[in-house]
Image (cartoon, grey):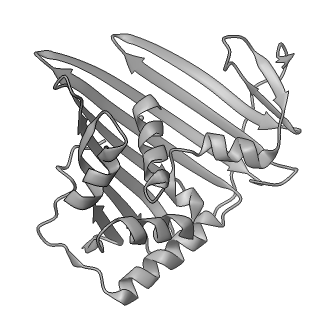
Amino acid sequence: MKVKWIRAAAAAACLSFAVPTAAFAQETAVSASQEELDRLRSALEQTGSMTSFDWTADLSSQYSGYGLTITFDQQSRIQVSGGGTGEMTALRTDRETALGETEETVSFYTGGYYYGEDYGFPMKSQITPEAVLSAMTEDILAVSGTVVYDNLAADFPPPSVEQMGEETVYTYVADPEFLAEFSADSEETYTVFAVQLYVGPDRYVNREKRELRNTDPEGYELVVYMDNRLNNPGQPVSISLPSTAGYEEW
């Protein structure tokens, strides 16, 4: 399906997630030229080819209706060294806050094993580095490199572009036709979907933001903001892994 990639990204956001921007409206932005689009594609290619990286991810959502508002926040850090290779090590930490409660979780990969508490107890599983890398970075578009560029080009109108300090900011906003198609196979009606990519002077995509809004048949509205940042792109990543003691093989 044409919108399968973006629906998966939306589902990940709604299940897991900072800056409300009303679909990233920018008064000084102009349509990107082909040269500017080529620079974005090159930046995504360089970013997606990294085997070591350190991302922080902030996710915030509000579910509201009939005077009730529920807020969910998540802060994550994903560190990877030797990504996709037999020597890969990776660490993901998450801090989730909802209904006044906060929960912190840690998962990591080393020596061909994934360690986590996915089923409520410390467990480890032998799994390929590619599978772990995909699961740990599912909320980060730029990790997919030029695949993201091609999907955005296919599904969204051409982006606007704006210079903000040393960064070039590309903003994609879904049009009504796309939102209607996106809503067709869902109980929810999507009203906003926007993606913003920041390219630094080092030609890495060092930040990405997303905004998603939908309403359900009962009139409740879900608003999701995602703000992911790439720390020190192109530099070696040092990871301090927890002890593997106490994990049962699963």
Instruction: Confirm whether residue 87 shows in the render.
Output: yes
Say which residue appears at 83% left-offset and 37% top-offset: 127
In-image side of 248 versus 145 (left or right): right
Observer-nearest of 42 and 156: 156
Say which residue appears at 42% left-offset and 57% top-offset: 207
Instruction: Confirm whether residue 238 shows in the render.
Output: no
User: Residue 49: where, in percent of width, then height?
Assistant: 66, 67
Pick out the residue farthest to the front: 184
Pick out the residue farthest to the bottom: 35
User: Residue 119: where, in percent of width, then height?
Assistant: 68, 15
* Residue 178 image-quadrant placement: bottom left
Observer-nearest of 8 and 246: 8
Say which residue appears at 54% left-offset and 48% top-offset: 55
Across the whole image, how many numbered discs are drawn on residues?
A: 0
Observer-nearest of 63 and 197: 63
Quadrant location of the C terminus? top right
Question: Would you place residue 9 above or below residue 13 in this image?
Answer: below
In-image side of 37 versus 103 (left or right): left
User: Residue 101: where, in percent of width, then height?
Assistant: 40, 10
In-image side of 248 versus 230 (left or right): right
In-image side of 143 versus 239 (left or right): left
Question: Would you place residue 103 above or below residue 15 in this image?
Answer: above
Say which residue appears at 48% left-offset and 38% top-offset: 12
User: Residue 195: where, in percent of width, then height?
Assistant: 34, 57
